[in-house]
Amino acid sequence: MIGVLLMGIAAGLLAGLLGVGGGVLFVPALTLLVGLTQVEAEATSLLAIIPVALVGAVSQARYGNLRARDAIVVGLFAIPGAVVGVVIVNNVPERAVELAFAGFLLLVAGQLVRRVLRSAAQ
């Protein structure tokens, strides 16, 4: 339970600080600390990120950083993709899902490193 509590705190901190935390932190932690399967962790993460996203968005709105129209458009167009994604993830081997998620995390990490290096060069 302590691991889960620490995961929640870390996810909230990362969400507020970097705009990440849900899938990037929750899914690995839920699989490693709680013992959920990849698909269970992804489903749990989807629900767990709702309060984090709401609090983060409201807090960012206070600073004038929230672009609500853009968020609504992205969110509405993401709904069909989420429905299709759930169907796919429940019909492919779990190992394929794990590898796809690992690949996604590597892609995100590579993009972050590239941004840091580009910023340092300027």
Image (spheres, rainbow, N blue to C red):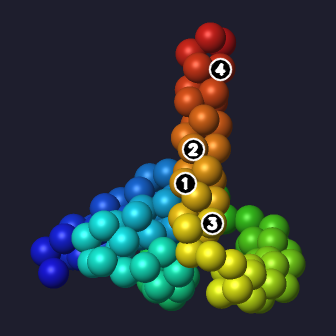
Left or right: 64 in relation to 16: right
Query: In front: mark 1 or mark 4?
Result: 1
**Outermost residue toward the top in this view:** 121
Disc ID at residue 21: none
Mark 4 element type? helix
| Above or below for 116 versus 14 | above
**Going from the N terminus, do you reach mark 1 or mark 4 first?**
1
Q: Are marks 3 and 1 in contact (CB under 8 Å)?
A: no
The type of residue carrying mark 2 is: Leu
Mark 3 surroundings: few (<14), some (14-19) or many (≥20) residues within 10 A: few
**Image position, residue 10 (x, y; %):** 31, 62
Mark 2 element type? helix
The type of residue carrying mark 1 is: Ala
Disc ID at residue 118: 4
**Image position, residue 16 (x, y; %):** 45, 60
Left or right: 84 in relation to 2: right
**Going from the N terminus, do you reach mark 2 or mark 4 first?**
2
Q: Residue at x 41, y 57 (%)?
A: 14
> What residue is pinned by disc 3?
96
Disc ID at residue 102: 1
| Above or below for 4 versus 21 | below
Q: Are marks 2 and 1 in contact (CB under 8 Å)?
A: yes
Name the quadrant of the C terminus: top right
The type of residue carrying mark 3 is: Ala
Distance from label 1 to label 4 (Cα)?
Answer: 24 Å
**Going from the N terminus, do you reach mark 3 or mark 2 first?**
3
Dividing the picture into quadrants, the one containing residue 120 is: top right
**Image position, residue 78 (x, y; %):** 79, 77
Query: In front: mark 2 or mark 4?
Result: 2
Query: In front: mark 4 or mark 3?
Result: 3
Distance from label 3 to label 2 (Cα)?
Answer: 15 Å
**Going from the N terminus, do you reach mark 3 or mark 1 first?**
3
